[in-house]
Image: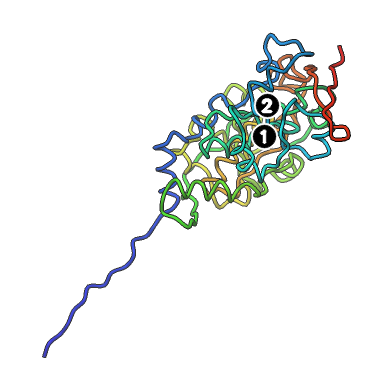
Protein backbone atom coordinates (compact mmCIF):
# COMPACT_ATOMS: atom_id res chain seq x y z
CA UNK A 1 0.00 0.00 0.00
CA UNK A 2 1.00 3.60 -0.43
CA UNK A 3 1.41 6.17 2.32
CA UNK A 4 1.16 9.83 1.45
CA UNK A 5 3.07 12.26 3.62
CA UNK A 6 2.49 16.01 3.44
CA UNK A 7 4.67 18.47 5.26
CA UNK A 8 2.73 20.63 7.69
CA UNK A 9 3.15 24.36 7.41
CA UNK A 10 2.26 27.19 9.71
CA UNK A 11 2.20 30.91 9.17
CA UNK A 12 5.28 32.65 10.56
CA UNK A 13 4.78 34.51 13.82
CA UNK A 14 4.58 38.24 13.20
CA UNK A 15 5.96 40.51 15.90
CA UNK A 16 4.46 43.92 15.21
CA UNK A 17 6.46 45.52 18.00
CA UNK A 18 9.78 44.44 16.48
CA UNK A 19 8.66 45.61 13.04
CA UNK A 20 7.73 49.01 14.46
CA UNK A 21 10.90 49.24 16.54
CA UNK A 22 13.10 48.45 13.53
CA UNK A 23 11.20 50.85 11.29
CA UNK A 24 11.51 53.72 13.76
CA UNK A 25 15.22 53.06 14.25
CA UNK A 26 15.82 53.03 10.49
CA UNK A 27 13.88 56.28 10.00
CA UNK A 28 15.45 58.40 12.76
CA UNK A 29 12.43 58.24 15.04
CA UNK A 30 14.26 57.38 18.23
CA UNK A 31 13.49 59.53 21.26
CA UNK A 32 16.59 61.66 20.75
CA UNK A 33 15.44 62.49 17.21
CA UNK A 34 11.86 63.26 18.18
CA UNK A 35 12.91 65.47 21.10
CA UNK A 36 15.58 67.44 19.24
CA UNK A 37 14.67 71.13 19.35
CA UNK A 38 10.97 70.38 19.73
CA UNK A 39 10.00 73.35 21.93
CA UNK A 40 10.31 77.11 21.42
CA UNK A 41 9.51 79.88 23.86
CA UNK A 42 7.66 83.03 22.90
CA UNK A 43 10.70 85.09 23.86
CA UNK A 44 12.93 83.03 21.58
CA UNK A 45 10.48 82.91 18.73
CA UNK A 46 9.95 86.66 18.88
CA UNK A 47 13.53 87.63 19.58
CA UNK A 48 14.03 91.30 18.79
CA UNK A 49 10.32 91.87 18.22
CA UNK A 50 8.48 94.36 20.39
CA UNK A 51 5.56 92.88 22.37
CA UNK A 52 3.21 95.20 20.48
CA UNK A 53 4.28 93.89 17.07
CA UNK A 54 4.41 90.10 16.93
CA UNK A 55 3.08 89.68 13.42
CA UNK A 56 6.36 87.97 12.58
CA UNK A 57 5.23 84.99 14.66
CA UNK A 58 2.10 84.53 12.57
CA UNK A 59 4.16 84.79 9.38
CA UNK A 60 6.82 82.32 10.53
CA UNK A 61 4.48 79.65 11.90
CA UNK A 62 1.21 77.97 11.17
CA UNK A 63 -0.23 78.08 14.70
CA UNK A 64 -2.58 75.30 15.86
CA UNK A 65 -4.28 76.06 19.18
CA UNK A 66 -5.61 73.06 21.12
CA UNK A 67 -7.55 74.92 23.81
CA UNK A 68 -11.33 74.96 24.08
CA UNK A 69 -13.28 77.06 21.59
CA UNK A 70 -14.35 79.40 24.39
CA UNK A 71 -10.80 80.04 25.55
CA UNK A 72 -9.56 80.33 21.99
CA UNK A 73 -12.07 83.07 21.22
CA UNK A 74 -11.13 84.87 24.44
CA UNK A 75 -7.56 85.23 23.24
CA UNK A 76 -5.24 83.65 20.70
CA UNK A 77 -2.20 84.29 18.53
CA UNK A 78 -2.86 85.98 15.23
CA UNK A 79 -4.06 83.60 12.48
CA UNK A 80 -4.12 80.60 14.83
CA UNK A 81 -6.44 77.71 13.97
CA UNK A 82 -8.46 76.12 16.76
CA UNK A 83 -8.33 72.31 16.88
CA UNK A 84 -8.09 69.38 19.30
CA UNK A 85 -5.50 66.77 20.09
CA UNK A 86 -7.70 64.09 18.55
CA UNK A 87 -7.84 66.04 15.27
CA UNK A 88 -4.24 67.27 15.18
CA UNK A 89 -3.24 65.20 12.14
CA UNK A 90 -6.21 66.38 10.10
CA UNK A 91 -5.57 70.01 11.00
CA UNK A 92 -1.83 69.70 10.31
CA UNK A 93 -2.53 68.34 6.83
CA UNK A 94 -4.16 71.67 5.98
CA UNK A 95 -1.43 73.82 7.52
CA UNK A 96 1.04 75.82 5.49
CA UNK A 97 4.71 75.92 6.48
CA UNK A 98 6.19 75.24 9.88
CA UNK A 99 3.71 74.18 12.54
CA UNK A 100 3.63 75.62 16.07
CA UNK A 101 1.23 73.85 18.44
CA UNK A 102 -0.20 75.80 21.36
CA UNK A 103 -2.21 74.73 24.40
CA UNK A 104 -2.72 76.03 27.95
CA UNK A 105 0.57 74.95 29.55
CA UNK A 106 2.65 73.28 26.84
CA UNK A 107 1.88 69.74 27.97
CA UNK A 108 -0.85 68.76 25.50
CA UNK A 109 1.03 70.57 22.74
CA UNK A 110 4.10 68.44 23.49
CA UNK A 111 2.05 65.30 22.99
CA UNK A 112 0.62 66.67 19.76
CA UNK A 113 4.07 67.58 18.44
CA UNK A 114 5.29 64.04 19.13
CA UNK A 115 2.40 62.63 17.12
CA UNK A 116 3.19 65.09 14.32
CA UNK A 117 6.91 64.33 14.26
CA UNK A 118 6.17 60.62 14.15
CA UNK A 119 3.84 61.33 11.22
CA UNK A 120 6.37 63.11 9.03
CA UNK A 121 6.12 66.68 10.33
CA UNK A 122 9.73 66.73 11.46
CA UNK A 123 9.85 70.47 12.06
CA UNK A 124 6.68 70.82 14.16
CA UNK A 125 7.18 72.67 17.44
CA UNK A 126 5.45 73.28 20.75
CA UNK A 127 5.10 76.73 22.35
CA UNK A 128 6.91 76.43 25.68
CA UNK A 129 4.62 76.98 28.68
CA UNK A 130 1.67 77.23 26.27
CA UNK A 131 -0.44 80.36 26.11
CA UNK A 132 0.49 80.87 29.76
CA UNK A 133 3.85 81.99 28.44
CA UNK A 134 2.42 84.34 25.84
CA UNK A 135 0.52 86.77 28.00
CA UNK A 136 -0.21 86.91 31.74
CA UNK A 137 -3.92 86.90 30.92
CA UNK A 138 -3.65 83.17 30.22
CA UNK A 139 -1.32 81.97 32.98
CA UNK A 140 -3.91 80.79 35.51
CA UNK A 141 -3.16 77.08 35.08
CA UNK A 142 0.53 77.49 35.76
CA UNK A 143 0.01 79.99 38.56
CA UNK A 144 -2.36 77.64 40.36
CA UNK A 145 -0.41 74.43 39.80
CA UNK A 146 3.24 75.42 40.19
CA UNK A 147 3.78 75.25 43.93
CA UNK A 148 5.73 73.55 46.66
CA UNK A 149 3.98 70.57 48.21
CA UNK A 150 5.66 69.17 51.30
CA UNK A 151 5.21 65.43 51.14
CA UNK A 152 6.93 62.54 52.91
CA UNK A 153 7.28 60.60 49.66
CA UNK A 154 9.40 63.30 48.04
CA UNK A 155 12.86 62.20 49.08
CA UNK A 156 16.01 64.34 49.08
CA UNK A 157 18.48 61.51 49.61
CA UNK A 158 18.96 58.05 48.19
CA UNK A 159 19.84 56.46 44.87
CA UNK A 160 17.50 55.60 42.01
CA UNK A 161 15.87 52.18 42.01
CA UNK A 162 18.13 49.59 40.39
CA UNK A 163 17.19 48.97 36.77
CA UNK A 164 16.32 45.55 35.48
CA UNK A 165 15.10 44.20 32.17
CA UNK A 166 11.55 43.37 31.12
CA UNK A 167 9.87 41.89 28.09
CA UNK A 168 8.79 44.26 25.36
CA UNK A 169 5.10 45.08 25.02
CA UNK A 170 2.90 43.32 22.51
CA UNK A 171 1.01 45.34 19.96
CA UNK A 172 -1.57 44.31 17.40
CA UNK A 173 -1.83 45.98 14.02
CA UNK A 174 -3.71 45.47 10.77
CA UNK A 175 -0.50 45.56 8.75
CA UNK A 176 2.97 44.04 8.73
CA UNK A 177 4.49 47.18 7.18
CA UNK A 178 6.43 49.41 9.56
CA UNK A 179 5.14 52.71 8.18
CA UNK A 180 1.55 51.51 8.27
CA UNK A 181 1.90 50.15 11.81
CA UNK A 182 3.32 53.50 12.95
CA UNK A 183 0.47 55.44 11.37
CA UNK A 184 -2.07 53.11 12.93
CA UNK A 185 -0.45 53.42 16.35
CA UNK A 186 -0.28 57.22 16.24
CA UNK A 187 -3.97 57.44 15.38
CA UNK A 188 -4.84 54.94 18.10
CA UNK A 189 -3.20 56.85 20.95
CA UNK A 190 -4.56 60.34 20.21
CA UNK A 191 -7.57 59.73 22.45
CA UNK A 192 -5.77 57.62 25.07
CA UNK A 193 -5.75 58.91 28.69
CA UNK A 194 -2.17 60.04 29.32
CA UNK A 195 -1.85 62.10 32.52
CA UNK A 196 -1.65 61.43 36.26
CA UNK A 197 -1.77 63.93 39.11
CA UNK A 198 1.07 64.25 41.60
CA UNK A 199 -1.46 63.84 44.44
CA UNK A 200 -2.30 60.34 43.18
CA UNK A 201 1.32 59.30 42.70
CA UNK A 202 2.62 60.74 45.98
CA UNK A 203 -0.20 59.10 47.91
CA UNK A 204 0.92 55.61 46.82
CA UNK A 205 4.20 55.76 44.85
CA UNK A 206 4.67 52.01 45.30
CA UNK A 207 1.68 51.46 43.01
CA UNK A 208 3.49 53.05 40.07
CA UNK A 209 6.57 52.42 37.98
CA UNK A 210 8.00 55.93 38.32
CA UNK A 211 10.77 57.23 36.07
CA UNK A 212 12.56 60.47 36.91
CA UNK A 213 13.68 61.97 33.60
CA UNK A 214 16.42 64.18 35.03
CA UNK A 215 20.17 64.37 34.98
CA UNK A 216 22.04 62.78 37.85
CA UNK A 217 22.96 66.26 39.09
CA UNK A 218 19.32 67.34 39.30
CA UNK A 219 18.42 64.09 41.07
CA UNK A 220 21.07 64.79 43.69
CA UNK A 221 20.21 68.49 43.99
CA UNK A 222 16.42 68.49 44.09
CA UNK A 223 15.37 65.00 45.18
CA UNK A 224 12.87 62.56 43.74
CA UNK A 225 9.67 60.62 44.26
CA UNK A 226 10.18 57.69 46.61
CA UNK A 227 11.21 54.54 44.75
CA UNK A 228 11.74 56.26 41.40
CA UNK A 229 14.05 55.01 38.68
CA UNK A 230 16.27 57.39 36.73
CA UNK A 231 16.16 56.00 33.21
CA UNK A 232 17.33 58.99 31.24
CA UNK A 233 20.42 58.53 29.09
CA UNK A 234 19.37 54.94 28.33
CA UNK A 235 15.81 55.72 27.33
CA UNK A 236 15.80 54.86 23.65
CA UNK A 237 14.54 52.26 21.23
CA UNK A 238 17.43 50.05 22.33
CA UNK A 239 16.79 50.65 26.04
CA UNK A 240 13.05 50.13 26.20
CA UNK A 241 13.43 46.86 28.04
CA UNK A 242 14.28 48.87 31.18
CA UNK A 243 10.57 49.80 31.36
CA UNK A 244 7.84 47.49 32.63
CA UNK A 245 5.02 47.22 30.08
CA UNK A 246 2.91 45.32 32.60
CA UNK A 247 3.10 47.83 35.45
CA UNK A 248 -0.30 49.19 36.40
CA UNK A 249 0.90 52.68 35.44
CA UNK A 250 4.28 53.76 34.12
CA UNK A 251 4.85 57.37 35.21
CA UNK A 252 7.42 59.65 33.62
CA UNK A 253 8.09 63.00 35.21
CA UNK A 254 10.33 65.90 34.31
CA UNK A 255 10.51 69.52 35.48
CA UNK A 256 7.34 70.88 33.89
CA UNK A 257 5.38 67.98 32.43
CA UNK A 258 6.16 69.11 28.91
CA UNK A 259 9.07 66.76 28.15
CA UNK A 260 7.34 63.91 29.97
CA UNK A 261 4.26 64.47 27.79
CA UNK A 262 6.45 64.03 24.71
CA UNK A 263 8.07 60.89 26.13
CA UNK A 264 4.72 59.43 27.16
CA UNK A 265 3.29 59.86 23.67
CA UNK A 266 6.36 58.20 22.14
CA UNK A 267 6.01 55.29 24.58
CA UNK A 268 2.26 54.96 23.97
CA UNK A 269 2.89 54.62 20.24
CA UNK A 270 5.40 51.84 20.94
CA UNK A 271 2.83 49.85 22.87
CA UNK A 272 3.35 51.13 26.41
CA UNK A 273 -0.27 52.09 26.82
CA UNK A 274 0.23 52.09 30.58
CA UNK A 275 2.57 55.10 30.26
CA UNK A 276 1.37 58.42 31.66
CA UNK A 277 2.89 61.83 32.26
CA UNK A 278 2.95 63.49 35.67
CA UNK A 279 0.93 66.69 35.28
CA UNK A 280 3.01 69.84 35.79
CA UNK A 281 6.03 67.69 36.59
CA UNK A 282 8.16 68.65 39.57
CA UNK A 283 6.78 72.20 39.31
CA UNK A 284 3.63 70.84 40.92
CA UNK A 285 5.63 69.42 43.84
CA UNK A 286 8.72 71.56 44.44
CA UNK A 287 8.04 74.45 42.10
CA UNK A 288 9.68 77.03 44.32
CA UNK A 289 12.94 75.12 44.74
CA UNK A 290 13.96 74.44 41.12
CA UNK A 291 14.66 78.02 39.98
CA UNK A 292 16.25 77.20 36.65
CA UNK A 293 13.24 75.08 35.62
CA UNK A 294 10.44 76.78 37.50
CA UNK A 295 7.44 78.59 36.09
CA UNK A 296 8.42 81.45 38.39
CA UNK A 297 12.11 81.21 37.57
CA UNK A 298 14.25 83.89 36.00
CA UNK A 299 14.24 82.12 32.64
CA UNK A 300 10.56 81.27 32.61
CA UNK A 301 7.89 82.90 30.50
CA UNK A 302 5.75 84.04 33.42
CA UNK A 303 6.49 87.69 32.67
CA UNK A 304 6.03 87.65 28.89
CA UNK A 305 3.44 90.06 27.62
CA UNK A 306 2.62 89.77 23.93
CA UNK A 307 -0.49 91.07 22.23
CA UNK A 308 -3.24 88.70 21.17
CA UNK A 309 -6.55 88.55 19.32
CA UNK A 310 -10.07 87.99 20.55
CA UNK A 311 -13.04 86.87 18.48
CA UNK A 312 -15.85 89.34 19.05
CA UNK A 313 -19.06 88.92 17.05
CA UNK A 314 -17.12 86.98 14.45
CA UNK A 315 -14.45 89.65 14.09
CA UNK A 316 -10.81 89.48 15.15
CA UNK A 317 -10.03 92.24 17.66
CA UNK A 318 -6.46 93.00 18.72
CA UNK A 319 -5.74 93.30 22.43
CA UNK A 320 -2.55 95.23 23.05
CA UNK A 321 -0.26 94.10 25.89
CA UNK A 322 -0.17 96.02 29.13
CA UNK A 323 3.03 98.04 29.10
Q: Quadrant of residue 106?
A: top right
The residue shown at (42%, 36%) is 27
Q: Quadrant of the C terminus?
A: top right
The residue shown at (59%, 21%) is 217
Which callout, 2 or 1, points at the residue further toward the start of the chain? 1
Q: Quadrant of residue 97?
A: top right
| Disc 2 to disc 1: CB gap under 8 Å | yes
Q: In the structure shown, which secondary structural element does the residue marked by tag 1 occupy?
A: helix
Q: Position of residue 298 (x, y in %)?
A: 74, 14
Image: 90 above or below 159:
below
Q: Position of residue 26 (x, y in %)?
A: 39, 37
Q: Position of residue 263 (x, y in %)?
A: 58, 37
Q: Quadrant of residue 105?
A: top right
Distance (Cα) linking label 2 and label 1: 7 Å
Q: Position of residue 191 (x, y in %)?
A: 66, 49
Residue tagged 2? 127
How packed mark 1 is, by other alpha carbons closer than 10 Å (few <14, some 14-19, many 20 or more), is many
The residue shown at (83%, 39%) is 70
Q: Quadrant of the N terminus?
A: bottom left
Q: Is 114 positioned to the left or the right of 77 in the image?
A: left
Image: 190 above or below 308:
below
Q: Is 304 positioned to the left or the right of 121 in the image?
A: right
Residue tagged 1? 109
Amino acid sequence: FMVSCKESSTDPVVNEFEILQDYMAANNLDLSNISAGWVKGGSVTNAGVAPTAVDSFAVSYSVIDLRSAVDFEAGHIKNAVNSTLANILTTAAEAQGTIMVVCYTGQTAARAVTALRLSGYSDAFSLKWGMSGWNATFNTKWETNAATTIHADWQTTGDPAATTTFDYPSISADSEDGAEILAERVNAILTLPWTQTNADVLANPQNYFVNNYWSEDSWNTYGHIEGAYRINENLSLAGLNNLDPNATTLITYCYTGQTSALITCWLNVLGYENAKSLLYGANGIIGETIPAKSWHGANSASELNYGYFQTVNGEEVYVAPTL
